[in-house]
Amino acid sequence: MLKLAIVGRPNVGKSTLFNRLAGKKLAIVDDRPGVTRDRRFGTGRLGDLDLELIDTAGFEDVTDESLEARMRRQTEQAVAEAQVILFVIDARDGVVPQDEVFADILRRSGKPVVVVANKTEGRAGDAGALEAFNLGLGEPVSISAEHGEGLGDLYAALLGAEPRADDEHDDDEDDSRAGPGEKPIRIAVVGRPNAGKSTLVNRLIGEERLLTGPEAGITRDAVSVDWDWEGRRIRLVDTAGLRRKARVEEGLERLSTQDTLRSLTFAEVVLLVMDATHPFETQDLTIADLVEREGRALVFVLAKWDLVEDPGLSLKAFIERAEEMLPQLRGAPVVALSAETGRGLDRLMPAVVKAHADWSTKIKTRDLNDWLKMAVERHPPPAVNGRRIKPKYMAQTKARPPTFVLFASRADKLPESYRRYLINSIRQSFDLPGTPIRITVKSGRNPYDEGSDDPVKAFQSRRRAARTATK
């Protein structure tokens, strides 16, 4: 069980996050700061991570004998006890001096720290999340604890920060097999009922691990299976079939559907399994769109390929239809296979690993701005009311999925069509076919530019200053 301390200044949403992770309202939540005073303990679960949670009072920079100072000592005790620290900031307020003081204290603690930029629903906290990079504690995770947004990204960050078992037990066979710091690729296998999901998982792992049959709806719970593929750790999650919402009637089926959607949220790569004899029905399109909106890497799997009469023509028609029906996923890999015979199965995992690598891509700032200059020269933004929009600078704020911020004059006037052009151009220029890409457009001077004429040099200078401050 992973022991987490949730810390930060008053009224940033620590108790709301505590309740969200615990799955119930254990801590009192109010708009007034300072409601929590003592440490509060609870247990929770995020994906397949069991958590021991510690909620703390808001951090105050005082060391006397006042109530606030005693509350601070409680927080320091929680930091000492925890394995991983969740440092919560209010993204709508941005980074304030009190956050910087607390960040310095956490840095000296030597504990793994995950910076959580809370209250980012509706993009209201995008600027604050960018500022959180300057704390020098790694890439911040943007979430909304109140609305449950961004929990998949938080799960991935906790996996990266979780102390490895082999740090304490050198003879741990499972971790020694994985290699230093390697985490399993998390794959959710989703699709309509009876599309062949469980049969595919059984074929991949080489054993009858999951119950299969001609009846639709055999799988009810999301079943996790750990597996090794060519030295890579893989975690496959077989899920219940997803039917259209109007056709979900029984309470048990509703629970299965919720479990499937939860598995999708915590996946890194999603295999959308479709019956090759009836692909791209309405529910398949709905699932694909949901995967893109959740920001997960996607691989289309055409199962039961042995039943298709003209494979070459059918595959070409499928790819054309995919690009027509789901342009936001243009270029996503398509693997046609038969789990029954094993035909085409050898192409699946290479496609998964490539999709995962693309999804995790980080592009150098200089390369990104060289590309931006060429993209704008090739196709300038349109003029609005006689005035042209001028893109100035671009930076990647996170990976998984690749997320960027574009600084431009009159950013609020940039048409959605031009944003789509930039996304498609990034995919083509950096070889990221089918990868979900996010671009936020902002006005004004970029936050990395401290007056330098070269924004890249200014950004590098700011990062060097931040690293120097941490020593």
Image: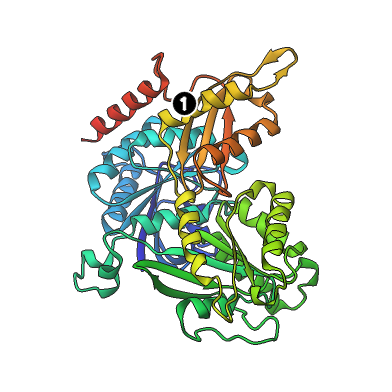
Q: Is residue 313 left or right of residue 364?
A: right
Instruction: Determine whether 286 is above or below 9 in the image.
Output: below
The residue lying toward the viewer, choosing from 357 and 465, is: 357
**Residue tagged 1:** 370
Q: Secondary structure at mark 1?
A: helix
User: Which residue lies at the image location 38% right of the left edge and 67% below the top edge?
Assistant: 233
Residue 155 point in image, percent of width and height: 45, 58
Which residue is located at x 69 percent, y 33 percent? 416
**Residue 442's x, y, as percent?**
57, 27
Of residues 200 and 177, the one drawn nearer to the viewer in this rendering: 200
- State how many labels appear: 1
Residue 446 point in image, percent of width and height: 48, 23
Q: Tell me if residue 145 can be seen.
A: yes
Q: Is residue 92 visible?
A: no
Q: Residues within 10 Å of mark 1 (few under 14, many from 20)?
A: few
Residue 462, quarter of picture: top left
Q: Residue at x 63, y 75 (%)?
A: 240
- Residue 342 at what x, y percent from top left? 54, 77
